[in-house]
Image (cartoon, rainbow, N blue to C red):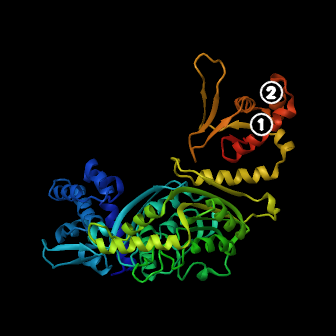
Amino acid sequence: MSVPGSEPGLVDGLRQDLERAAFRVEHVEDVLGGVAAAALHREETVPALRATADALVGQDAQSRDVAALTRLFVLGAGAPRQAVDLALPSLRTAGAEQLGLVVAAGNGADDEVRARVDLRPYAAVDGHGEAHWWIASDLGEMATGGALRTDHVLGVGGASTTLAQVTVRDRRRRALDLGTGCGIQALHAARHTDHVTATDISARALAFARLNAALAGAELDLREGSMLEPVAGEAFDLVVSNPPFVITPRRPDVPAYEYRDGGRAGDDLVRDLVAGVGQVLAPGGVAQLLGNWEVRRGQEWHERVGEWLDASGLDGWVVQRELLDPAQYAETWIRDGGTTPERSPDEWAVRYGAWLDDFASRDVEAVGFGIVTLRRPSDERAAGSRLRRLEEVTGTVRQPLGPAVAASLAAQDWLAAHDDDALARTRLVVAPDVTEERYLTPGDPDPRVVLLRQGGGFGRAVQLGTATAGFVGACDGELEVGQIVAALGALLGVGADAVAAEVLPTARGLVADGLLLVP
């Protein structure tokens, strides 16, 4: 399996050619059309192959170039050498061969050229604005038609996109991308960080990351090694990691893929990373990572993961986004490696059984997936005042989440510094994305249920009591919290203390979650 080169002159030529060809996400979708683009997202290539074949013989030069590059690097299909030379006029087929991107059958204009790597445009909004790059990785199962090799270097998948969109994007001095793979998290970090270190146990992955950084014009400090070993003794203001968190049976008849399997039993790798990442966090530093965790018989998921947070000694916030039973989990990751019951029924059965046996050996009833945010406080707060939050949010969220996470961390700091007396002297305003819903029984003048609903971020819905609903309705920045509480106490005839006991805890929660803001 080849690895690409990163010779500066050739990479510069490649970048110029890709820019000239307008090889971007929106133009690929234009060439494919809606039906073929949707089918490709389902990993069905036939409509895309037909659309690009038509575009190759069309009259529009830009569409021809985009079609040739899409066939070559996205679909894994052959393209005539002449079409590749036209699409890459600076690099040409010969230069692409030197970079290890393609292999040509011959020197004739009609001789077939095939890709040795996947190279596709990438676009995302990450909380620091729009990002547009080209990302190289190994050709996937869709292009090769076979199972993945164990040293496969993955491109940008759903997990990568999730992490990129949830990461806080305020200005940082030093960042670490632990387990960088193709380098996508490091590229995002380089947009708002002075110095980015990216590590991986795979030398092949680092070769792809080096090419992708060169294409993006980003400078990365790339280091080979396992987990925190390459950065021992250093401190970072931001750590991001899409680690090899997949729980895999440790058996010789079950392949371990470098990009997803950390070589540990169960969820030990994620546990150790959560507990140990504080070793490389500077004061005020934030670590954000994805992970799986086992839910074992007789224990709730948050009990197990909560123990990891306690061991870290850091502020901790865990959001569980998904919960799969052992069978669902096994099916997901066996298919991810390219093994299917249709193509390899015997291997499928053996691996399926191995996963079920492995989970049964530890009494695992389900596997959670979620986002872990950790922070080393910049001050020496008492343990009881540190953030420790574990919650389940399985509904639709508004991406990018990074700004909402950063705002919530800042709100937690503000709340820790302001007791109820200080809160009473504060003016609050309802966030602009918040709406109120009231549910009434026909003929009844008073609502049975009042909900505050958040339009952005985590899309939270909070049910309010009568006093709290009245309080939120009055939070327009004109009156202090204490003044509103006193007025409600008089209006409801129960006194300010009774209203404060109901309202203030809820108000703190609404500030923490961004439904109420401190102007």
Q: Secondary structure at mark 1?
A: helix
Q: Position of residue 234 (x, y in %)?
A: 67, 78
Q: Are marks 2 and 1 in contact (CB under 8 Å)?
A: yes
Q: Which residue is mark 2?
A: 488
For the point 66% across and 44% down, the residue is 514
Name the amino acid, label 2. Answer: Leu
Instruction: Work out whether residue 359 can be spotted.
Output: yes
Name the amino acid, label 1. Answer: Val
Relative to 367, 377 lies left or right? right
Q: Position of residue 455 (x, y in %)?
A: 56, 40
For the point 52% across and 47% down, the residue is 395
Name which quarter of the figure residue 235 lies in: bottom right
Q: Quadrant of the N terminus?
A: bottom left
Q: Position of residue 217 (x, y in %)?
A: 46, 69
Name which quarter of the figure residue 74 lies in: bottom left
Q: Which residue is mark 1?
A: 503
Q: Earlier in the sequence, mark 2 or mark 1?
A: 2
Relative to 471, 209 lies left or right? left
Q: Quadrant of the C terminus?
A: top right
Q: Nearer the viewer, residue 219 or 443?
A: 443
Depicted 512 relative to depicted 65: above or below: above
Q: Secondary structure at mark 2?
A: helix
Tag 1: Cα neighbours inside 10 Å, few (<14), some, or many (≥20)? many
Task: Please count the marks in the image.
Answer: 2
Depicted 286 relative to depicted 264: above or below: above
